[in-house]
Image (spheres, rainbow, N blue to C red):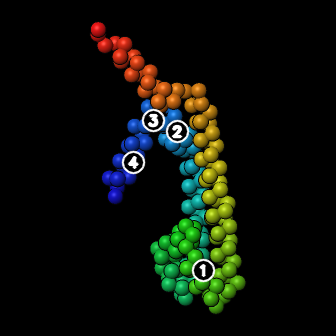
C-alpha cells in the first residue's frame, strides 16, 4: 500500500517538468504553509470532538467506547457515515447527542472542509495564472518533434 502511494507521489513529481502538467504539485507547494496551519487547527478541533464523544457517549455507544474507536467514528461521520446518528439520537441524553452531532457536522464539515477548499482553490488560481501563457503539452511535444526532425541529417 505504501509503495503504491509513493509511486503516485513520484508520478506527480515527474509531471512537474511541464507547467500545465505540474499544477497539482505546484498547488500543494504553494499552499503548504496554509495547509500546515489548517492541519494543526483541524487536528485540534477533531481531537476535542473525539474526546468529547468518548467521555459523553463512550459508556453507551460502542462506536465511542474507546478513544481510538471514537476517533474512527468521528472520522466516519465526517466522511458521511450516518449509521451512528441513529444510535446518537436514541441516547439517553438526546439533547447532548443532537448538539454534538450537528455542531460536529457544522464545524468540521461545513466550515473546516470549506476552509480547506478555499486554501487549495486560492493556491490553484495562483498556479494556474502563472501557467496560463505556457505552452500546452501537445504543442510542446510537437515543437520537440519538429526540432528533432530538423536535427536529423539528410
Q: Earlier in the sequence, mark 4 or mark 2?
A: 4
Q: Residue at x 49, y 72 (%)?
A: 72
Q: Secondary structure at mark 1?
A: helix
Q: Which residue is mark 3?
A: 16
Q: Which residue is mark 4?
A: 8
Query: Is mark 2 in CB contact (under 8 Å) with mark 1?
Result: no
Q: Is residue 119 above or below residue 98?
A: above
Q: Nearer the viewer, residue 148 or 73?
A: 148
- How many angstroms separate mark 4 from mark 1 (CA)? 35 Å
Q: Position of residue 143 (x, y in %)?
A: 44, 21
Q: Which residue reaches farthest left?
A: 153
Q: Position of residue 90 (x, y in %)?
A: 62, 88
Q: Residues within 10 Å of mark 4 (few under 14, many from 20)?
A: few
Q: Position of residue 139 (x, y in %)?
A: 48, 26
Image quadrant holding the C terminus, namely top left
Q: Which residue is mark 1?
A: 85
Q: Residues within 10 Å of mark 3 (few under 14, many from 20)?
A: some
- How many angstroms separate mark 4 from mark 3 (CA)? 13 Å
- How many angstroms separate mark 3 from mark 1 (CA)? 43 Å
Q: Is residue 42 visible?
A: yes
Q: Which residue is mark 2?
A: 23
Q: Earlier in the sequence, mark 4 or mark 1?
A: 4
Q: Earlier in the sequence, mark 2 or mark 1?
A: 2
Q: Which residue reaches farthest bottom?
A: 92
Amino acid at each position: 500500500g505504501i509503495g503504491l502511494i509513493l509511486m503516485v507521489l513520484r508520478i506527480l513529481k515527474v509531471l512537474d517538468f511541464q507547467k500545465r502538467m505540474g499544477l497539482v504539485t505546484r498547488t500543494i507547494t504553494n499552499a503548504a504553509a496554509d495547509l500546515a496551519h489548517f492541519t494543526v487547527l483541524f487536528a485540534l478541533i477533531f481531537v476535542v470532538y473525539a474526546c468529547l464523544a468518548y467521555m459523553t457517549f463512550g459508556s453507551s455507544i460502542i462506536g465511542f467506547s474507546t478513544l481510538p474507536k471514537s476517533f474512527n467514528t468521528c472520522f466516519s461521520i465526517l466522511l458521511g457515515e450516518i449509521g451512528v446518528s441513529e444510535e446518537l439520537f436514541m441516547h439517553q441524553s438526546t439533547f447532548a447527542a443532537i448538539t454534538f452531532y450537528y455542531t460536529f457536522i457544522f464545524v468540521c464539515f461545513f466550515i473546516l472542509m470549506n476552509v480547506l477548499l478555499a486554501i487549495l482553490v486560492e493556491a490553484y488560481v495562483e498556479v494556474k495564472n502563472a501557467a496560463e501563457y505556457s505552452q500546452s503539452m501537445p504543442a510542446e511535444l510537437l515543437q520537440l518533434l519538429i526540432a528533432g526532425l530538423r536535427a536529423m541529417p539528410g
